[in-house]
Image (cartoon, helix red, strand yellow):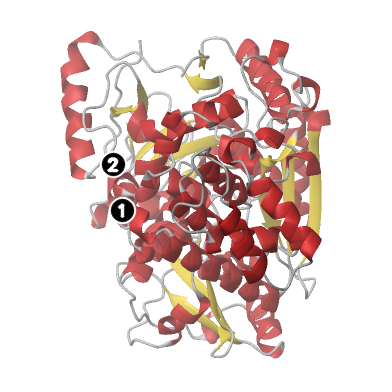
Amino acid sequence: MRRRSNDTCTPEGQDSGIAPRPRCSDFVLHRSPKAYLSYKSGSPEETLRTIQDVLRPYFFPDIVVSLQPNEFGSTWFCRVSLVHGSVGQNGKGMTIPLALASGFAEFMERLQALYLWRNYSPALPHLEMTPDVIPENERTQWNTFNAALAREMHDRIVPQPSLDGMYEFHDLMNGTVVYLARSLVYTPFLTTGTAAGNTREEALVQALCELFERYAARTVLRNRMVVPSIPWNFLSPSVREMLHQIQEAGFEVYVKDFSLGIGLPVVCVVVGTPEAGYHARPGSAPGINRAVERCILEYYQGIPSTAAKISAVREATDRIKHIMSTLSSHLDVLFSLDEFLTVNFLNAYDFPPDELEFLTKDAPGVAPWDYEREDFYEEIDLLLGLCRKNEIRLYARDLGWMGFPTVQLLSPDLKGHEYDSIERLSLHSQTLMQFQKLLLRGISCVKSPEFSELLHTPEVMYHCLVHNPPLVDRLRGLPQDGSFWVMNSWYFLGLVAYYHQDIDLAKCFFECYRAFNPQDEYSLCLIQAIALLPSEPWNERGLLKEEVAASLRERLHGVSQSTVEEVLMDLQDPKAVLDILDQVVVPCDTCDTCAIASECSYGRVLSVMKKIGDSFPGIFTWESQP
């Protein structure tokens, strides 16, 4: 049984020169010198060797890596995937080795936090970490503590946390043990505050910086704050050179102070033009140059071109606005467009480029900060001092069960907004769980009246809205490979609504599908036809009225007559429109009897989870029937 301890964290045999830091018995902090370019505890080659050794016994041959430079060749983007493209993580660096080390370290973070397979439905069997045992005489205390914490953060999901699922954390402010409910620990933004590194100390600094970054970004964006610009002469020549490269390509470049006037080590690089709009990437690090460097690395993650990045964000946000407008009568009860865009910004930093011009304006009073030291241990001391000064609570736990240092930090003061968020409300709802269960059972359940009712709920519509790409396999929580599985989820839902003879909803869903600019003639004709249908287009036998079909023949333009006839044939009987989808929505009951088991990505991920569970007994609980 774990007990509390108030031992200090001074490295053994050393005089730290720092005031002793209380710690818990199994969360000891040590000296962690930066041995590589005053940047990391180890070289990228050392990091990669360590992770390779950790992973090889389990599934190293199944890992795929891709690399991509930005348009200037100054940064590299890396994607590390396991089994399926959606089961993986991104990395970035100034060199190929640094990008690879970043990608694999992020991969280890997601893996050890059990967040790597988050795109699979929680309705499928999966691993959970076994809760810690709470001393019997403390159970009432921690139940009260967690209930109060949930109320403080306006948690929409679990106002009364269960004592049967709590994990041991360590209060970094006073060194005591804290037990936190699983419902509070696992949020949609689990990875904010979760980090891996060559040492626990390196990981802890990164986790702290992630918390600062997201908190500052949300605060500035939500309040449309005009903040100071950071003079470029504060920056190193190499960082200025990267900024000049972007500037010389024809873009305005701003480095903004996101410290909020309280010394948070956060900056934001804003790039764009008044005509094209702007894109913003915040970043945090103990030193200002590393923070700006991080912004630039994040900016080119996934898309190597500056112009293409802004264009892609504009296209994505315009599409979201169109869909939100189309579904407003269903979604307005849950959230506003601005609330959605703010939450989405925290996920992907995609915000309408024409709405970020306020970040190009200046406020006085830039306040330089510097927490960068030659040892991560000393940086932790300074950053904890910052938190103490601003009354920021921090609870930490070790997630390095596989052998690579990983930590999770939870702060009610920096992460509180996540618990009162639309994403948490939707993703943890029983409504969405039941929706995915029915989808996983196949077309027969999709045809049920219950499924039709679920389609009208804002939780389900939000789930459809956030998926990118919007594919049926993602909607089911069962992402797959290959063109066989590629079907736009809005197209699918439009057919489902038509099957249930819900014309208004079918029109909404097909209008959402239009936002993705389908180019094939059949889709264009189908979208037009659905939009032109009257509210009662069927006769007493449930078939499309002949006069309705005749009207559509006259009004459908820009497509061939043969395509018009094909569409009318398919719309003739609503009860037949889903017959061709049995192979797209294959029933997912058990892997043993599944017709597509050999090609199903989840089956391969499931075998990885089972191997991990068997290799680390006692750490995990198998959730076979969520």
Q: Nearer the viewer, residue 626 or 165?
A: 626
- Residue 303: image location, x then y, percent: 70, 65
Q: Which residue is drawn at 21% across and 37% down?
A: 149
Return the residue at label 2.
173
The Cα–Cα distance between marks 1 and 2, rounded to whole angstroms, is: 9 Å
Q: Position of residue 251 (x, y in %)?
A: 63, 87
Q: In this view, does 403 lie above or below 427?
A: above
Q: Do the residues labelled 1 and 2 touch (CB within 8 Å)?
A: yes
Looking at the image, which residue is at 35% across and 49% down? 422
505 lies above or below 226: above
Residue 466: x and y, percent? 51, 52
Q: In this view, does 251 lie above or below 541?
A: below
Q: Mark 1 points at which residue?
A: 387
N-terminal-most mark, 1 or 2: 2
Quick one: SS at disc 2? loop
Rendering quarter of residue 236: bottom right
In this view of the protein, can residue 482 be seen by the observer? no
The amino acid on which the numbered mark 1 sits, given as a three-letter code, is: Cys
Q: In this view, does 197 lie to the left or right of 93?
A: left
Q: Name the image quarter holding residue 89.
A: top right
